[in-house]
Amino acid sequence: MATVQSRSPAGVTGPGRAAIAARQLRTDRWWLAPAVTVVALAAFVVYATWRAFTNTDYYAAPYVSPFYSPCLSENCVEMQGGPNWAVLGDWWVLSPALIFLALPLGFRLTCYYYRKAYYRAFWASPPACAVAEPHQRNTGETRFPLIVNNVHRYFFYAALPIAVILTYDTVLGFRNAEYEWGHMGLGTLIFLVNIVLVWGYTLSCHSCRHIMGGRLRHFSAHPVRYRLWTWTSRLNGRHMELAWGSLFSLALADLYVYLLATGVFDDPVLF
């Protein structure tokens, strides 16, 4: 993202700029994409906030909601044979979902794609290509809070162990309600799809691509890292789709556990 401050105090209408009366000359529905982004992201934020603070109905054997894993406090519900490590003791009295909420949230908020999405959708900066933004000046990411976006690569390091833990949760989904292995329910399939999308989004991250091959002067001298860089580059081309897909799958996995925990229906057994 650009970090150079605009020299014109009046933005696109300042002196020295072309005198075009119209705000934009596009005739298509350019506003549709940012409008959909606003609705989708706002819906996820509202849903995830509600679920994080409810502090209930996040475990239905053998599934644990991805919003509440790992569960590190003693006020977690009993998860027999599940990922419940009460290493924090009883001092944490809030929802256990709030312990690690900042890590995946920070990873997505600072993500290059999501920054483009919410800059356009919520701040209209700019709302679309060839559409003037309403702001008179642009400081880019040089001031708080947007300057925090520059630590994206560190949130990437924090997101990796979360993805590993969610993989562990997915493996535990191959047990039945009696914790016997060799089971596969609809929830198992949902968690499988979710973890594939989560790993796809995580590994397609621009920071991951830079770690694999950034600052290498000669790819020929680093054949392994070159292969990894090539692979992550291909994934990076699908970063937008993986970002939305993993966001939807996380909410779907949590919703599925919630419906099971509240007794709306039983987990259909596939085999």
Image (cartoon, rainbow, N blue to C red):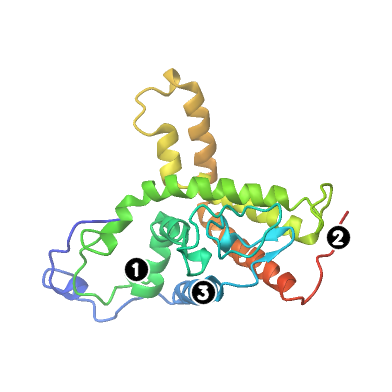
Distance from label 3 to label 2 (Cα)?
30 Å
At which x and y percent is residue 104? 47, 57
Q: Which mark is residue 53?
A: 3
| Residue sticking out furthest to the right | 271
Q: Specify the quadrant of the image occupied by residue 127.
A: bottom left
Q: Is residue 231 left or right of residue 103?
A: right
Counting residues from the start of the chain, the first of labels 3 and 2 encountered is 3
**Label for residue 130?**
1
Q: Say which element carries label 3.
A: helix
Q: Position of residue 126 (x, y in %)?
A: 33, 69
Residue type, numbered disc 2? Val
Q: Badge 1: few (under 14), some or many (20 or more) residues near its Cα, within 10 Å?
A: few
CA gap between label 1 and label 3 equals 41 Å
The residue furthest front is 90
Q: Say above or below: 255 vs 113.
A: below
Identity of the amino acid at label 3? Phe
Q: Which residue is mark 2?
A: 269
Q: Nearer the viewer, mark 1 or mark 2?
A: 2
Left or right: residue 2 versus residue 38 is left
Q: Nearer the viewer, mark 3 or mark 2?
A: 3
Dot 1 falls on a residue whose secondary structure is loop
Q: Nearer the viewer, mark 1 or mark 3?
A: 3
Label 1 or label 2, whichever comes before in sequence order: 1
Q: Mark 2 Cα within 10 Å, few/some/many (few <14, many 20+)?
A: few
